[in-house]
Amino acid sequence: MKYAPLRMDLLGTIFFAMLTGCAMAHSTDTPKPTAALKPAIPAGEETMYARSLVSPGDPARLDRVLAKARRGEPLTVAVIGGSITEGALASSAAKCWASLTARWWRERFPQAKIEFFNAGIGATGSDIGAHRVQKDLLAHHPDFIVVEFAANDGNETKWAETLEGLLRQILKQPNHPAVMLFFTMHDNGDSAQQWHTLVGRHYGLPMVSYRDALWPEVRSGRMKWSDISPDVVHPNDRGHAYCAAFIGAFLDRQLAALPAEGRFAPLEPLPAPLFTDLYEHTDFYDAANLQPKRNEGWITAVSDPRFGPLWSATRPGSVLEFEVEGTVVSMIYRVVKAEMGMAEVQLDDGPTVKLNGWFKETWGTWNACQELGRDLSPGKHKVRITVLNEKDPASAGHRFDVQAIMVAGTHGPSARQ
C-alpha cells in the first residue's frame, strides 16, 4: 500500500478570474441562417493555422457525427475542461471559444437542432474531470466533445493517466461520440500537450493546438502575449476567437472531405490502455450521495453551484469519517481567502496529511485535489478528516470545507455504497 505525500497542484497557480457564465450551461437555440462562420485566415497567418493541427486522427467517429448533422438530425455538442473552457475573461458567454465552437455547428447545419453543454470548471484538471465526466458530461449523451485540460494538467505521466481514464469513459459510450483534444497554454508556453498527445495518438483522436499555432508568434515577438491574454493563461476575446477558429478550420477540412452515406471508415474497437485503465472506473461522492460513518461537528452546505453539496466545519476537533472502495482515493477541498483553517486527513492507518484551506490569492475559490493513497488493496478504506486548532496567521477562522471524496479503480457499480 502506498500513500501520496502532500501535493500543491499546478492547478493552484491558475487564476480562476471572473467568469462569464459560459460554463456548466446548455443551450438549444438555433440561430437564423447567416453567413457561414468561416475562420478568417488573414494574409500571412496560413502557417499559424497549419501549425494548429497536431493530428487529424481517425475520421470514422467524426464523419458519422458530421453526417448526422448533414441529415438534419438533432445533435449535442459538449466541452469539458478548466477555466478557459468555462469562459474566463471572455467579455460575454457568446464570445468564449466553447460557445463559438457550438456556433460553428449551428451555422454549418441550420436545419439541425444543435444542443450545447459546457462542462468546464475553473481550476480543475483531468484528475477531477475523470471522476465527474459521467455526471457533468456523459449524462447529456453528447455526439461531439472537445476536451481541454492542457493548461491545468501537469506535463507528466500522472496526468496522462487521468486524461486516458476520462477519454476511455467517453469512447466507451454506445453512441460512439467523436472526441477532440484541444491544447491551450500558459504565458511561458508551458502545457501538458506533450503527454496529452501520446494519449491522443494512441486513441486516434483529432488534436488541435492553440499553443502550437500561437506560441511561435509570441516567442518571436511577432505577437505580444497581451494581444491574446490579460493574465498568465486565460485568453481574451481575441484569444478565444483564435481557439474557435483553429477548431473550426479543422472541422471545415473534415466537412469538405466527408464521404457519401455508407462510405465511412469502420469504427475501430477501443484499444488496450496506453498507461492504465485505472481512471476508467471512478466514483464521485459529495454530500448528496455519500453518508459519513462518523460526523462530529460538520454540516452540509452548497458553496459552489457547479459541484454538489459539501461538508463544512468551523470548530477545531470536528471529525468526519467516510468508508469508500477503490484502489485510489482522493479528496477535493476548498481553498479560498476567507476565514479558513487547516485539517488533518488520514487514510486507513497511514500517515496523516495536513491541508490548508486558506491562501493569499484573491481571484476566487480553488477546488484543490489531494490524492490520499493509491495502489490500495481491494475492499473498503476509511478516510478521516479532523479540523485542527492550527491555522494560517492571516486567517480569522478555522472553517474547512470538504467538497468531495473521489475514488478510482472501482471497476463497476458494485463498489458504490
Image (cartoon, rainbow, N blue to C red):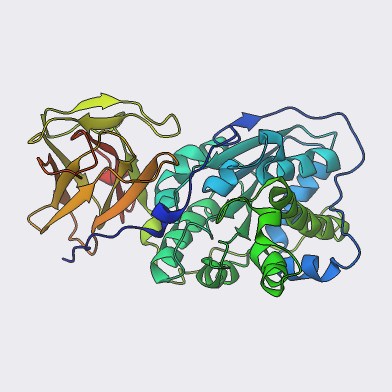
Q: Is residue 244 above or below residue 218?
A: above
Q: Quadrant of the N terminus?
A: bottom left
Q: Quadrant of residue 401?
A: top left
The answer to whether residue 192 is above or below residue 382 is below
Residue at screen point 69% across, 40% down: 99
Rendered residue at 89%/43% (across/down): 36
Q: Position of residue 288 (x, y in %)?
A: 31, 28
Specify whether residue 206 is in view: no
Asked if one can make out residue 164 in the rendered structure from this viewpoint, the answer is: yes
Location of residue 77 in the rendering, given as x and y in whole percent from the top left corner: 67, 42
Residue 197 vertical placement versus 97 (above, below):
below
Residue 134, image x, y percentages? 46, 43
Q: Nearer the viewer, residue 339 or 109?
A: 339
Q: Could you tell me which quadrant the C terminus lies in?
A: top left
Image label count: 0
Direction from residue 333 to residue 228 in the image, left or right: right
Residue 406 lies, in percent from the top left, at 31, 47
Horizontal relation, residue 288 to residue 107: left or right:
left
Task: Name the residue located 50 percent from the left edge and 71 percent from the top edge.
Answer: 195
Residue 72, quarter of the rendered image: top right
In depth, the one of 54 and 263 nearer the eye is 54
Name the residue nearer the viewer: 152 or 307.
Answer: 152
Residue at image location 59% in from the left, 71% down from the top: 201
